[in-house]
Image: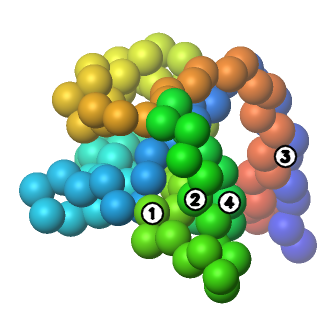
Amino acid sequence: MDVSMKIEQPAVRLSVFVGESDQWHHRPLYHEIVRRAHEAGLAGASVVRGIEGYGAGSRIHTSRILSLSEDLPILIIIVDAEERIRAFLPQLDELVTEGLVVLDPVEVIRYVGGTPS
């Protein structure tokens, strides 16, 4: 029988908004951000592809068929303890030349499964 334990703790959500066509050494920028987050031992990262959006340049990027864009919005989300996220920020300074980086305080609620001893 599995026993689940609820763990709650404060954390920070790091959201990085970039364009799908943004590159780092001829590879997608989002891939390099996720690779470095993994290398830094952060808890996890997810990449979400947007269907429409605009940024500082005010140019709308959309996936609608009549105005298909090759530069859709990309959102990279990483959640971990604040000190670990803040230690990762200098890497983003190096990688993100155009985009938006946002930090939000969040409460993490996760369920850890295991078997009783």
- List the residue tagged with mark 4: 52
Q: Residue at x 28, y 32 (%)?
A: 97
Expressed as whole percent of the image width and height from the top left, the position of residue 66 reads 65, 82
- Cα separation between marks 2 and 3: 43 Å
- Cα separation between marks 2 and 4: 5 Å
The type of residue carrying mark 4 is Glu
> Quick one: label 1 or label 4, which is nearer the N terminus?
4
Instruction: Reply above or below: 84 against 59.
Output: above
Q: How many marks?
A: 4
- List the residue tagged with mark 3: 5
- For label 1, the SS is loop
Left or right of 59 in this view: 106: right
> Quick one: label 2 or label 4, which is nearer the N terminus?
4
- For label 2, the SS is strand
Expressed as whole percent of the image width and height from the top left, the position of residue 91 reads 26, 29
- Cα separation between marks 2 and 1: 7 Å
Residues marked 2 and 1 touching at CB (< 8 Å): yes
- List the residue tagged with mark 1: 71
- Cα separation between marks 1 and 3: 42 Å
